[in-house]
Amino acid sequence: MSQGTAGVSVIKITDPCLDGVELSAVQEVLASGQLVQAERVRQFENIFAESVGVSHAVMVSSGTAALHLTLLACGIGPGDAVAVPDYTFVATANAVALTGATPLLVDVDAATCNIDVAALRRVVERFAATGAKPRLRMIMPVHQFGLPAEIDAIATLANEYGLLLVEDAACAIGSRYHDRHVGTRGQASCFSFHPRKVLTAGEGGAVVTNDGALAERVRALRAHGLSVAGDKHTLVTWGFNYRMTEIHAAIGLAQMSKLESMLLRRRQLADRLQEELAGLAWFTRPVVPTHVTPNWQSYVGVLSPDVSRSQTIERLAASGIEARPPATAIHAMGPYREAARATGGTFPVAEMLDRCALALPLHPRMGEGDVTRVATELRHAGRA
């Protein structure tokens, strides 16, 4: 725990669980002299695929790279559109835009912050059923903050209209929907290993799929478009350098050995925080449907409109508690304003969350006393 102003200890919004295990793993890589995409990357791919419950995992340089490569491998490009939630991190929409396709922004559910299935159906009916331009070809829901989206209903909708389905599971390693790991329903799914995530490799991402041909396209795209068979390299497409390093894979492998204990601790602390924050009329706690099990990558609640979020964050910071806005209404960001107007979307829930949602500290390095302190200081901050 770091020290803040006047020696007050700071409870950080997140704090990766790194120790001597990761250090030894990195030292072994450095001693080997093999630094880029070799045996440790392959081991990480195999263990990660088994953990999620899929046939293939392809490790890449970031979660955004995973999204970008998956979209390209699925043939998404200019003239196409992909439905994505409006309230999320901008990487989801950016990955679509980088292919030349159009992100069709969809409002989210106020209780879960995930894509609103009814609003999604309206978008699908307009752009897929009527043949409106751009041509809707894919739905890409986000499992926001590690809370699974309503993937059964989304998959049913995708099947009904013949749309591709790719899950942005960047935040959701270990999360389950009807006791099934997220990331197994569509053509592919994408995960992130950024330090803000439950499992970190420092950076990195993964594309997971049961489609062997799709996995091979992603493997080629991540490595300059080259397909490798033995000692023969064949250029099959234009590609990128989105490879994962052995150092990142070594950290990821070390983290995988701790994943279940980290998930258990996050859920214990989240339960405690839910109890401690009960009864606050001006703070709506996270809602968890009974059929899902989140990994609690983030603890996100919603302030009443008459409570200033910026002042609340400032007051918490003064008492040594990190808090922040958890995501963004994409339609309000410069490059997406015109696109949102052109597609005729309205986003009242995303706009409300953009003003009122608040992420509080939650990570395995916290103790029960830290949870009590976060809850106590939030009560004070909201009253002040």
Image: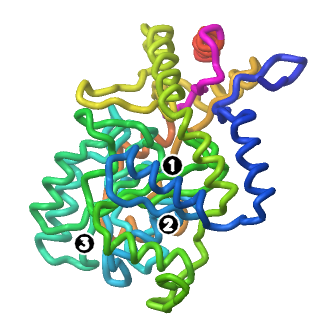
Name the kind of residue labelled 1 in the image: Thr
Q: Which residue is mark 3?
A: 136
Q: Residues within 10 Å of mark 3 (few under 14, many from 20)?
A: many
> Dividing the image into 4 quarters, which one contains the C terminus?
top right
SS class, disc 2: helix
Residue at left offset 21%, top offset 51%: 154
Q: Which mark is residue 94?
A: 2
Which residue is more in the foreground, 6 or 27?
27
Q: CA distance from mark 2 to mark 3?
A: 17 Å
| Image vertical order of residue 200 relative to residue 20, above or below | below
Which residue is more in the foreground, 192 or 163?
192
> Is residue 35 magenta-colored?
no
Question: Residue reaching furthest front?
Answer: 230
Could you tell me if the residues under marks 3 and 1 are in contact, i.e. CB atoms within 8 Å? no
Closest to the camera, between mark 2 and mark 1, is 2
Q: Residues within 10 Å of mark 1 (few under 14, many from 20)?
A: some
Q: Which residues are magenta?
A: 357-369
Q: Position of residue 378 (x, y in %)?
A: 60, 16
Residue at left offset 44%, top offset 90%: 236
Q: CA distance from mark 2 to mark 1?
A: 13 Å
Q: Which residue is mark 1?
A: 328
Q: CA distance from mark 3 to mark 1?
A: 23 Å
